[in-house]
Image (cartoon, rainbow, N blue to C red):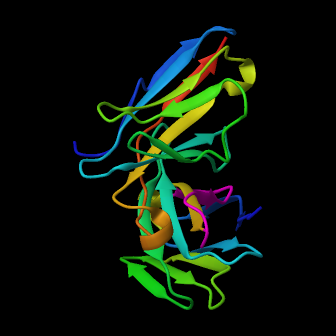
Amino acid sequence: NAGVMQNPRHLVRRRGQEARLRCSPMKGHSHVYWYRQLPEEGLKFMVYLQKENIIDESGMPKERFSAEFPKEGPSILRIQQVVRGDSAAYFCASSRGPRQYSNQPQHFGDGTRLSIL
Amino acid sequence: TQLLKQSPQFLSIQEGENLTVYCNSSSVFSSLQWYRQEPGEGPVLLVTVVTGGEVKKLKRLTFQFGDARKDSSLHITAAQPGDTGLYLCAGGSPAGNMLTFGGGTRLMVKP
């Protein structure tokens, strides 16, 4: 399977714990995007990263949320001190080039379902 | 803030019927993508339209991008139970990198 890989598929955390979500982009893709989806809603953009750089984080909450895409390894979305409202499906997408200049389509992984107890 | 409104939100039809899903905005988009999402899975790209007035066909699915690039439609001919799912439109802004998603249309096709 050469698609976008996300893990874990399901993650349960208690309030106050940390959640780490991982995303490996499609082969040949160096642009990663994170989205959040609440039940019965569309996806909301969170952050756009290239290798080692955050390009656009306009959709990220100002506190507790961070993202990285290191030179080696997957992209990580980190949520510190989780609260009940963080419960959602978190999707990662990747593209070959920047969407802005080349309308490169974004291909999505199957998401991580985060549940906060 | 760019917004995309999809209609209808829910649609339940019988196998063999035709249907149209609409995606509307007051903003101009540089591209419009349609995705289908199954429960427990990520959105799967169906099509990308980039030119105003563009029409693309994918078997029984016809996608149209409005002349002003503010709206789009998805028409399904002779719907089948396998078409059941959540259909999402997503617009790419001329200045940004993210996609703006509509709220989705949940389609159920009954045999």
- In the displayed structure, A4 sits above or below B30; it is above
- All told, the count of numbered labels is 0
Of the pair B47 and B15, the residue shown nearer to us: B47
Q: Let me know if residue B102 is in the magenta part.
A: yes
The answer to whether A21 appears left or right of B20 in the picture is: left
Residue A98 is drawn in which quadrant? bottom left
- In the displayed structure, B106 sits above or below A74; it is below
Q: Let me know if residue A11 is in the magenta part.
A: no
- In the displayed structure, B31 sits above or below A66; it is below
Residue B106 visible in image? yes
- In the displayed structure, B106 sits above or below B28; it is above
Q: Position of residue B5 (x, y in %)?
A: 73, 65
Residue B17 is drawn in which quadrant? bottom right
| Residue visible at 64% across and 50% down in the picture | A42
Of the pair B84 and A18, the residue shown nearer to us: A18
| Residue visible at 63% across and 28% down in the picture | A65
Residue B18 visible in image? no
Residue B2 is drawn in which quadrant? bottom right
Give the magenta range. B93-110
| Residue visible at 55% across and 18% down in the picture | A19
Q: Position of residue B11 (x, y in %)?
A: 66, 61
The answer to whether A16 appears left or right of A5 in the picture is: right
Q: Position of residue B1 (x, y in %)?
A: 77, 61
Q: Position of residue A92 (x, y in %)?
A: 46, 42
The answer to whether A54 appears left or right of B12 in the picture is: left
